[in-house]
Amino acid sequence: MGLNREQIAERIAQELKDGYYVNLGIGIPTLVANYIPEGVEVMLQSENGLLGMGEFPTDDEVDADLINAGKQTVTSVTGSAFFSSANSFAMIRGGHVDFTVLGAFEVDQNGSIASWMIPGKLVKGMGGAMDLVAGAKNIIVCMTHASKHGDSKLLRKCSLPLTGVNCIKKVVTDLAVMEIKDGAFHLIERAPGVSVEEIVSKTEGTLIVDGEIPEMTFA
């Protein structure tokens, strides 16, 4: 059946390392904040001017003035800081974000990403993604493996306007975890109950399958 949104976020959280400064994009990436592994301390940064985001609040913790870049209410952790969005983007552009998680419409086998617009559809703006793909040290994408029409989102070459070129290192989908290197997707894990054959059939780009591919594990 593949992973749901929460399971995708939980798997991505396993990539976090102690001491990371992390930016989470809008959508599934924001859920990663709820699954930070025990014993791992990271500082979550938001483009709208917050360093030190915590988990989403319970009903009695909600503060309408405390939001992330996606306009969702959040909590803050001990040691958090608030500042202007200009300073926030200076952090990003200056290369001070260790790790960012982004959603995407398409990713190709060379690590390019299309995430900000579909021609002919209303676009609110590009957000901070173009700065993040240029400034972050490590970028991981989370997405469904295929569109609702069954078309692969993992391509030989992106067809939509690009957000960044040759910048994505790893992709986590509802079906698989893949590294991008040497001009190809490399399958390293599969979702529980999902076969390698299904992943191959839903990947348009070059997919390298080397040996036995383990299933993802969760705590």
Image (tube, rainbow, N blue to C red):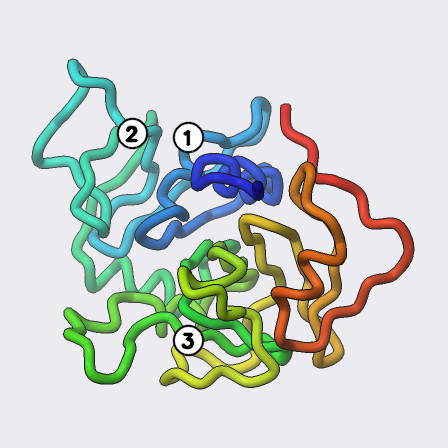
Q: Residue at x 52, y 78 (%)?
A: 112
Give the x, y percent position of residue 172: 57, 53
For the residues carrying marks 2 and 3, which lies nearer the camera in this image? Answer: 3
Check disc 1 and report the residue beneath it: 34
Disc 1 packing (10 Å; few <14; some 14–19; many ≥20):
some
Give the x, y percent position of residue 15: 61, 44
Q: Are marks 1 and 2 in contact (CB under 8 Å)?
A: yes
Q: Judge by depth and name the residue closer to the eye, 146 or 49.
A: 146
Q: Residue at x 58, y 40 (%)?
A: 11
In the picture, measured across the screen, residue 178 lies left or right of residue 63, that is right
Callout 2 secondary element:
loop
Q: Amino acid at mark 1?
A: Asn
- Mark closest to the chain's N terminus, 2 or 3: 2
Q: CA distance from mark 1 to mark 3?
A: 26 Å
Check disc 3 and report the residue beneath it: 114
Q: CA distance from mark 2 to mark 3?
A: 28 Å
Disc 3 packing (10 Å; few <14; some 14–19; many ≥20):
many
Give the x, y percent position of residue 131: 36, 71
Q: Amino acid at mark 3?
A: Ala
In this view, 193 is above or below 142:
above
Q: Quadrant of residue 82?
A: top left
